[in-house]
Amino acid sequence: MIMYTEKIEIRFFPNCYVYSSTLTPMHLRKAKLMFFWVRYPSSAILKMYFPDIKFNKNNTAQLVKWFSNFREFYYIQMEKYARQAVSEGLQRSEDIHVNKDSEIYRVLNLHYNRNNHIEVCLCRHHKTQCIHCSIPEPAPSNFEYVVQQTLREFFVAIQNGKDTEQSWKKSIYKVISRMDDTVPEYFRSPNFLEQLE
């Protein structure tokens, strides 16, 4: 089979970026890591954090689609664990607690951070760099909270029978979309992709 790809323009700029219109597996890995901070990034935000890409309609759509796929996996896991909590007889959403030791957190970390480029620090002494375990780029502490809140939202909806209604997840998506964080500045570094290799 013969595949045709569009001509790629590669240029060198003073800021050391090599511009290309091709999204690579390394870009996918970077996007997955960004999911720890943002679940609903706008295309403008995405363009800021992929400065080496010469954006066009196709690769912008591809990047947006990646995040759509990331969310799909995320919400499938949330629904699965929420249903499990309901079936185990849990009564109150406040009794659902998520931390980095939780099974659901480990499943998500394995999916979005398979090669452990972002370390999951369990000592809880820091927000940026851990002086106790020397982990330079810890996963954001806010991600635990987002996972916990998502799980609670799904739990309450299922417990109240909302899952029989059409589009029952939309209200949950709205809540979670407001919990996006700022992606760290180092994601914009021209050397970031080299660190993933």
Image: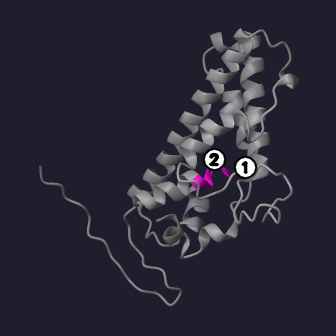
Determine the secondary structure under disc 2: loop
Left or right: 48 with respect to 101? left
Quarter of the rendering containing residue 96: top right
Q: Label 1 neighbourhood size at 10 Å, few (<14), some (14-19), many (20+)?
A: some
Q: Residue at x 53, y 59 (%)?
A: 30
Q: Please say whether residue 36 is one of the residues in the magenta stretch.
A: yes
Q: Label 2 neighbourhood size at 10 Å, few (<14), some (14-19), many (20+)?
A: some
Q: Residue at x 56, y 57 (%)?
A: 43
- Considering every residue shown, the one lying at the far bottom of the view is 14
Give the CA separation, mark 2 to mark 1: 7 Å
Asked whether 119 or 160 is in front, the reply is 119
> Which residue is denoted by mark 2 in the rendering?
40
Q: Residue at x 64, y 23 (%)?
A: 79
Check residue 180 in the rendering and tell me which mark sits there, or answer none: 1
Asked whether 116 or 141 is in front, the reply is 116
Magenta span covers which residues? Answer: 33-42
* Picture mark count: 2
Q: Is residue 158 above or below residue 34?
A: above
* Callout 2–callout 1 Cβ contact below 8 Å: yes
Instruction: Report the amino acid beneath label 1.
Output: Asp
Q: Position of residue 146 (x, y in %)?
A: 75, 40
